[in-house]
Amino acid sequence: MRRTPFLVIVMACAFLAALAGAAAAVSSTAGGWQRGHVPPGDLTLDFSDIAMLDAHVGLATGMIEEGGPAPLIPTIHRTSDGGATWTTVTDEQVYGQLSGVAFSDSTHAWAVGADYGSGDRQAALLLTSADAGKTWERVTFTAAAALQKVQFPSATTGYITGDDGTVYVTTDGGARWVKKVPGANDVMFSGLSFTDAAHGWVCGGQGNEDWYGGRCYATTDGGAIWTDVSPDPEAVVLDCSFVSGEEGWVIGQDGVIFHTRDGGASWSPQAAAIGAAVELTGVAFVDAQNGWATGASWPPTYGGKGWAVILHTTDGGSTWVQQDCGIVPSVQAVTALDAGSAWVAGEDSLVARTTDGGGPGFTPHTRPATAALNAIVVSRGAKATFRFRVTDPGVPRSRAVVVIVDARHRVKKSVVAGFGPNGETRTCTARISLPVGRYTWKLVCTDYAGFTQQSATVKPLIVR
């Protein structure tokens, strides 16, 4: 299952609980990414966007998943120490989520999202702050569709995107918003990038949530006129980042990355060493050379959430390397201030920062190979221990499933083996309740880069 940029409700609960526990134990991550502290009570928190006013003050928006009549509660977290610690500054007590956040100047900030109300009713959710995000109040906004992203290229000029192909423009600091429709009305504009008050781009998946393609539109006059500059109508593009009126990048599903040097009139695809199961949802460039793209890898052997992908480039996207950010399901958004300082936010309370560009990274060269290491004889109803190893040069981690098959190669049982280091002997344990007989077991693996294994050795399993 893939996640749209806005909302995922269906999850693999048992696996998520184990993954959240592992993630909570990680205070710093490899490769230069340092995880911020979020109060333990917010372990059900999923962040969807992040913005930094400067190297110290920042905001992250998302939702807290709870039971009861309002299982999804919009939330904003704030840091004043560069991302080392984050605290809740508002929990809007409605059923919905906040999906975008931005500063308009040193004191004013904005957050956007959706108030789902009850039944099929859905309304826009807009909050504003006049003290750099310490306190918030709701702003009356009559749009019937959810809001996705917000950006203020100046203190008075701002833009908000919606999930019904709309863009809202203000030129008076948010006192009044004017609706614009760049093109198709079935586009969820999850990407928004303005380089000044006049020049900007929006992009998103087309086809409501059952996307069949994507669209990107550009304006050079503050949103009065929009031009379709989509790199590929069949590519689902989910975010964009421009560093000038000419140069920018868009990213999206299936790991697509496109680059333009003429404002979107023409595009060139860029390749990263990732599998097609990768969905990129965030991108941030600080200049023509340095940038990050973030998202998740969705292995075919798992339901529920994927796991984190962070790509980094120092040559304008000619080459991309992956960076290890630890055990987290998905990185939804990224923001950066310079070539060394960047922040990411994602699922399971993830907020992390780097001050050295994120570390050296790694470039996958091969697909993983798996090896079952022990033959097993087990009494029916007893527990069996599976020992295995994943070999994948250049890729530090992988996630695997033990698969037990019968003599006719039919899958009889699958066991989540977990996320762990490559090149080391790993184990997992499961109770075997299969009928008495002879079976074989092997490992099905997808590595950190989103590639499935190229080979797998098997071992016998006998149930007595």
Image (tube, rainbow, N blue to C red):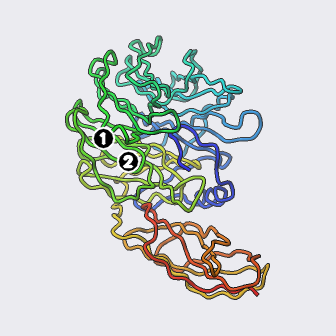
Q: Is residue 439 above or below residue 86?
A: below
Of 317 and 372, the residue lying toward us: 372
Whether residue 104 sits left or right of residue 226 in the image: it is right
Residue 380, position as x, y percentages in the image:
78, 82
To which quarter of the image does residue 229 belong? Answer: top left
Residue 144, position as x, y percentages in the image: 57, 19
Q: Nearer the viewer, residue 320 or 84?
A: 320
Residue 401 at x, y = what percent? Answer: 58, 69
Can you say whether 181 is above or below 216 in the image? above
Q: Quadrant of residue 337?
A: top left
Marks 1/2 in contact by CB < 8 Å: the verdict is yes
Circle 1: residue type: Trp
Q: How many marks?
A: 2
Q: Quadrant of the C terminus?
A: bottom right
Residue 393 position in % (x across, y down): 38, 73
Name which residue type carries label 2. Ala
Disc 2 element: strand
Left or right: residue 222 versus residue 108 is left
- Structural distance between the alpha carbons of marks 1 and 2: 10 Å
For mark 1, give the secondary structure.
strand
Q: Residue at horizontal 52%, vertical 40%? A: 48
In the foreground, 36 or 114: 114
Residue situated furthest right in the rendering:
381
Q: Is residue 12 above or below residue 203?
A: below
Residue 309, picture quadrant? bottom left
Question: Which numbered dot is residue 406?
Answer: none
Q: Give the labeled residue for mark 2.
A: 293
Determine which residue is flagged by label 1. 249
Residue lying furthest front: 408
Mark 2, Cα crowd under 10 Å, few <14 / some 14-19 / many 20+, is: many
Front position in the image: 63 or 182:
182
